Image (cartoon, rainbow, N blue to C red):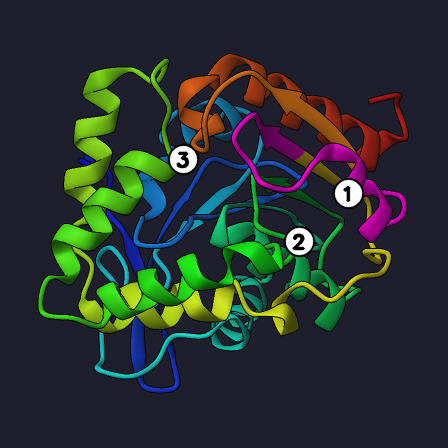
Amino acid sequence: MTDTQTLKYATHNSETIRYLDTGAGDPAIVFVHGWCCDHTYWRDQIPVFAADHRVVAVDLPGHGSSDKPDRDYTIDNFVDVVASLIGELGLDKPVVAGHSMGGVIVMNLARKHPGLTRGVVLVDAPLVPLPDALAPVLDATLAAFKSPAYQQAAAGFVRTQLFNTASPAAMVEETVAGMGTAPQRVVYSAIESTLSPESCIPGAIPVPAVFLRAVNLFATADQLRERYPGLEVTEFDCAHFIQMERPAETNALIGSFLAKVTTGAPA
């Protein structure tokens, strides 16, 4: 995906983290992308919310324009990076939105640093462990991601698991191509950590939280609500990239959530 705006940079553990910082106004909004993506996957949200809010959209380590050292990539590390960036930029309790793996990061950020955020938006994040019946499928997928044919395996996974027949064809092809540039170490280690049971421990999230669920997510809305008491779940009739397939509806929901956590207005 393309980006015409200049990225700034921060340093975390000697690694360069690139991010977009645009707009002005409180509360700030931090956007965290998903597995093998980058900040441009929020391209339909950034300019909308930058009209009234400071917007920060990060390229996580191993992704986009940030450094890509040959090491494992874990949810804990990503959480530390986002927390460090919020602190370095002096953001006052921003709302943090995460898509997919980014949603897992954001939930764990809220739990590890409950006073750091005002609320979290979780977009189709795998917050419920895979059913036991899918364990062999996950094992085979990870083995393929660790093989020399990892790029073909990742492309096939994105195409068949993250989209459906109603997804716009041009969006599918652009996304498959964009995500296919991720380094192999990112491909297998980041998804392995994302889908680990340790990354989605049940229990209430300590800040206001809303979940945007796509029709092809393996966890039902009731399972999400049961696992995370107090979580608000809104369902979308589209595939995994809700913020791209349904941008207007996504923006309306985020805007409503912002009003709720800022002024106490009804969502």
**Quick check: 126 left or right of 243?**
right
Quadrant assignment, res 121: top right
Q: In the image, is residue 185 above or below residue 144?
A: below
Q: Earlier in the sequence, mark 3 or mark 1?
A: 3
- The front one of 235 and 137 is 137
Contact between marks 3 and 1 (CB within 8 A): the answer is no
- Cα distance, mark 1 to mark 2? 8 Å
Q: Is residue 113 visible?
A: no
Q: Is residue 182 visible?
A: yes
Name the residue at the left extreme: 148
Extent of the magenta region = 212-231
Indicate which label's residue lies in the foreground, 3 or 2.
2
Q: Pinpoint residue 218: horizontal percent, then vertical percent.
A: 58, 40
Helix, strand or loop for disc 1 = helix
Q: Earlier in the sequence, mark 3 or mark 2?
A: 3
- Cα distance, mark 3 to mark 1? 27 Å
Residue under numbered circle 1 = 223
Crowding at dot 3, Cα within 10 Å, few <14 / some 14-19 / many 20+, comes out as many
Q: In the image, which disc is placed on residue 42?
A: 3
Work out which quarter of the rendered image holds the N terminus and state it.
Answer: top left
Q: Pinpoint residue 131: horizontal percent, then vertical percent.
A: 61, 54
Q: Pinpoint residue 93: horizontal percent, then vertical percent.
A: 71, 54
Quadrant assignment, res 36: bottom left
Residue under numbered circle 2 = 128
**Quick check: 83 left or right of 156?**
right
Instruction: Identify residue type, mark 2.
Output: Val
Q: How many marks?
A: 3
- The front one of 137 and 42 is 137
Q: Earlier in the sequence, mark 1 or mark 2?
A: 2
Q: In the image, is residue 197 above or below residue 228?
A: below
